[in-house]
Structure formats: structure tokens, C-alpha cells
Amino acid sequence: MNTQPPNQGAETPKSPEEVLKLVIQDLDSFRQNLTNQLSQDVYRLRVEKEQLNEDISKLRKQYEQLQSKQLESLSQRQIAQQQLWLKQLAQVLANNLQKQLGQKIRDLTESVDPGLQQAGIPGGELPMTNPSNNYYGTTNEFGDSLSGVVTGTFEALKQELDSYQSDLSVQLNSMRSMEQQGEVILEALVSRLQAQLENNNTVSSRTYEVSQSGSKNSANTTSSGKSMLTTSPVESSEVSPKSKTESTAKPKKSASQVQVGLILALLSAALLSLFNVCIKVILNTPPQPSKIFGLFPVEGLINPNVGNSLLILLLRLIVVMLLMPIVATFLYPAVWSDIERLIKSKDFSLWWKVIGSAFFLFLSQVLIYISIGNIPTAIAITIFFIYPIITVLVSWGLFGDRPSMIRIFAMVLIVIGGFLALPSGEGDYQQGILAAVGAGITFSGYVILTQMSAGKLHPIPFSLVNFAGIFVFSALGLMMPLPTEWSVNINIDPSVNVWSGLIVSGIILGILTLSSYVLNSFAIRFAGAARASIIGTSGPALTALFALFVIGEVLLFKQIMGMLLVIIGVAAMSFERMFAARQKTS
């Protein structure tokens, strides 16, 4: 038997509930410590990322300054060296000429009779006792030898200058190669730093989400922190192929952001539809005026021909070009550096694509104005939406992008809908229909050239250059001599101030254009380009609604059915592109 006394210093055993409470308290404290530490790490990484971005921008500026200083110093040294070489060559040439001239003069004086030189005659003249043929022969030999010496000297000088020029060209080529290598190294460094920062942020956010989801049953305060860290950022503004290939995995957008993006895309489409209705009010054909909301009759300011459409387009572009630089800088601060890089790159193929896309968009705008002025607004926009068919066919012919069965079915729907939407009844609608078809064809050319330029220039500077090109083309079109039926034709009525109405209309159209552009840009950032394009297919329907409520345009049943078929076909193409892009990324 154990006769030892019991251990007096041992602790009393605890119940399981107390042990469980202690474990839960330890886990809570551990979770709070881990959460605080991870949040501090995330904040520190963000600060370091901002500092690294500032350092990268400073390094770029220093690199450009050093490069410009190096080129200036090198050019000054080369000029000074060339001047020194020319001075030395001139001195050597002068010395050689002086020596040879002195030698020839001495030889000439020695060839003359010494007796005659000594027996001078008053007046300093030499008697012509010796024959003159010897004298003139010596003079001709002296001239020939002198010309030969000068020719040889200049040929040697030319050879030396050619050698100096070749050396300078070799040095400039080596400097250019070194500059290109430095740019490649700098871009690689920047991309590596950005990739490392993105990886650090994604790892820290994923760790934080895991810790939050693991402790969801023990605390209910984690939802707010998780929502702050899982908010998807705005899409990156870099468009270089390297950045695209290195950052293929983008964080998914939250449902709230997608909803906001879809609402913004719908507002953008609504503003474009209102824009089309305003064009109809400005370019209206007689005999009956438009009635705003069925109450206020408003006669069209000008007739819908080529010159008047150019005038409206120019007035609209004046407002756009005054405000677009501010809007572009707000949306994408690096817009001017991208344009400067485009100018300095001397990429003529890209320049031709940008100018060509602006020219096709200019033609499309002029033709759609003419079409809206001659046929109902919604019908003109519906016929204009044939451009996806042209785009698919051109892509198939140029790039070998064979259309899928969904695209073929959508193209058939668009063609059937376009024929059903054609206007019928009294009136000459041929000009408006042909203008709408031409607008769709030229707009497909704009789309093709824009796709060919994708990845080489950011969309915002691309749009700014496009607007500038349309402005120039509109001004040149008004300056060109046009036929009488195409020229600007404004009916001057003393009771109506047409020019004030045109100026106000241009301001309204410019504001609507920029507002729609800004809303569409934010819609693409929040919801993505594919979803925004799907919402954009509702343009004919929204135009029909605005035309019905604002100016009382009524469509027939078959025209409404045709418009719906066109919308379904274009939307099917957009859905097919979106799902194909998702399959490629997955």
C-alpha cells in the first residue's frame, strides 16, 4: 500500500468547459494577432509599391535627361572636332600651296634668260628678242601642274571627310543600339517589379481571406474587412503585350461592381440614343416639323445633305476637342506621354492604321447623319447595325478567322431583321437606306483597323487621336469644292436665327458625346468590355423609345420585329465572343 501523503502543491483539476473556454480565448487572441500582423504587412506592401512606382518614374525621367544630355554633349564634341579638323586641313593645304607656288615661280624665273633679267630697260619692260612660244609653254605647264595639285588636295580632303562621316555614322548606330538595349532592360525591370508587387498583394489578401473564413464561426465581424480587401481594382492602363502576358490572372470583379458597370453602360447607350434623336431634330426633312413631347413643334434647322452633315459634325467636334484633353487626362494620366511616344516611335504602320480608322469613322458619322435625316431614327440605327456582318467577313478574309455556327446564325438573323426594318409607304427612302448601309460598312472598316492597332496604343489616346483626325477631316471636307446639291445649304429666315440654333446644337451634341464616352469608359472598367458591348446592343431599341416619346416617331410591327431580330443577332455575337474569351483564359 502507498503510505506516502498526497501532493499538497498539485492544482485542482479543471472541468472540460473551462478548458474549452481557455482554448477558444487562445484561438481568438491568435487570430487577432495574425489579423493585425497581416493588415500591417498589406499596408506596408502598398506603401512600398507606391514608393517603387515613384522611384521608377524618377528613374525614367533621369534616364531621359541623361540621354538628352549625352546626345547634346556628343553632338557638340563632334562639331568642335570637325571644326578643328577643317582648320588643320586648311592650314596644311595653304602651306602646301604656298610652297608649290614659290617653287613654280622660282623655276619660271630661272627659265627666263639671265642676261635679260640683269640688263634692265628703263620702264621695266623686257625686249621681245627671245621667242614667246617657250614662255607661254612654261606658263601652261605651271597652270596644269597647279590645277593638278589643287585637284589632288581636294580629293584627299574629300576622302578624309568621307571617312570621318562613316566613323560618325557607326558611332551613332552604336548609340542607338545601346539606347534600345537600355529601354528593354528598363521595361523588364519595371515589369518584374510590378509582377512581384502584385504577387505579394495577392498572396497577402488570400492569406487574410483564409484566416477570416476559418474564424467565421467564432466571430461575426469579418465581413467588413473581407469586403474591403476583395474589392477588385480598376483595370490596368498598360496595354503592352508584355504586361498582358505576365499578368493574365486578373482578380474577379465583385457583383456590385458589375452591376454598377452595367448601369453605366445602359446610361451610355441611352445618351447615344438621345444623341441620335437630337440629330433627327436638327436634320429634319419637310413637310411636317418634329414635335418635342407632342407639345412644341420644332422645324429642322438644315437639310440632311453632305455639306450640312459636315457642318454639324465640325460644330460637335469643336466642343469635343476643347473638352476631350481634360477628360482624357482625368481618365488616363499617361495619355500625353503615350502620344509623345507614338510620335517619336516613327511607327508608320500604326500611324496609317490610326489615321485610317479616323477616316472611316468620319465617313460613317457623315453617312449616318444623312440617313437619320431621311428615314426614321430607329430604322437608320437598325440598318447601321449590319456592321458586325462586314467585320466578320473581313476578318475571315484577312486573318483567317473562320466564323462559328453561332456567328453564322446571328448574321442570318441580322440580315432578316434588316430587311424587315426597311421603311415602306410614301416617301423617297432610298437615299437614307443607302446612307445607313454605307455607314455600317465604313464603321466596320473602323472596327477592323482598331482591332489591328490593339495592344500597341491605349484606347484613350487612340480615341483622342481619332477625334482630332475627324475634326481635321471635317474641316477639310468643308473647304473642298462640293457639288451644289452636296454643299452647305442653310435657309436664312429672318424670323429664325439658324446659326445660334446650330451653335447650341453643336454644344449639346458635344456634351452628349463626351458624357457617353466617359460613362462607357467606367462601364468597361467595372463590368468589362464584353458585358458593356452586350448592353450596347440595345441601341436601336433605346433609340426607338426616345424617338417615340420625344418626337413621336411610330414604327410598324414588322419594323419592330426586324429591330428585335437585329438586336438578338448582335447580342448573340457579343455573348459568343465573351464565352470564347473565357475559355481561352481558362
Image (cartoon, rainbow, N blue to C red):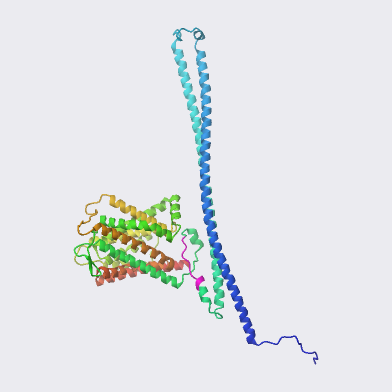
In this rendering, the answer to whether 154 lies above or below 556 is above
- From where the camera sits, is residue 406 visible? no
- From where the camera sits, is residue 544 visible? yes
Helix, strand or loop: magenta stretch: loop
Residue 225 placement, left or right of 273: right
Q: Position of residue 124 (x, y in %)?
A: 46, 10
The residue drawn where x is 50% and y is 21% is 101
Which stretch appears magenta? 227-237
In this rendering, the answer to whether 300 lies above or below 123 is below
Q: Quadrant of residue 39?
A: bottom right
Q: How many marks?
A: 0
Along the line of sight, the residue nearer the viewer: 183 or 395:
183
Residue 252 placement, left or right of 398: right
The residue drawn where x is 51% and y is 75% is 224
The residue drawn where x is 49% and y is 68% is 251
Along the line of sight, the residue nearer the viewer: 14 or 410:
14
Q: Quadrant of the N terminus?
A: bottom right
Along the line of sight, the residue nearer the viewer: 136 or 342:
342
Q: Position of residue 372 (x, y in %)?
A: 27, 62
Q: Position of residue 160 (x, y in %)?
A: 51, 33
In this rendering, the answer to whether 510 lies above or below 531 is above
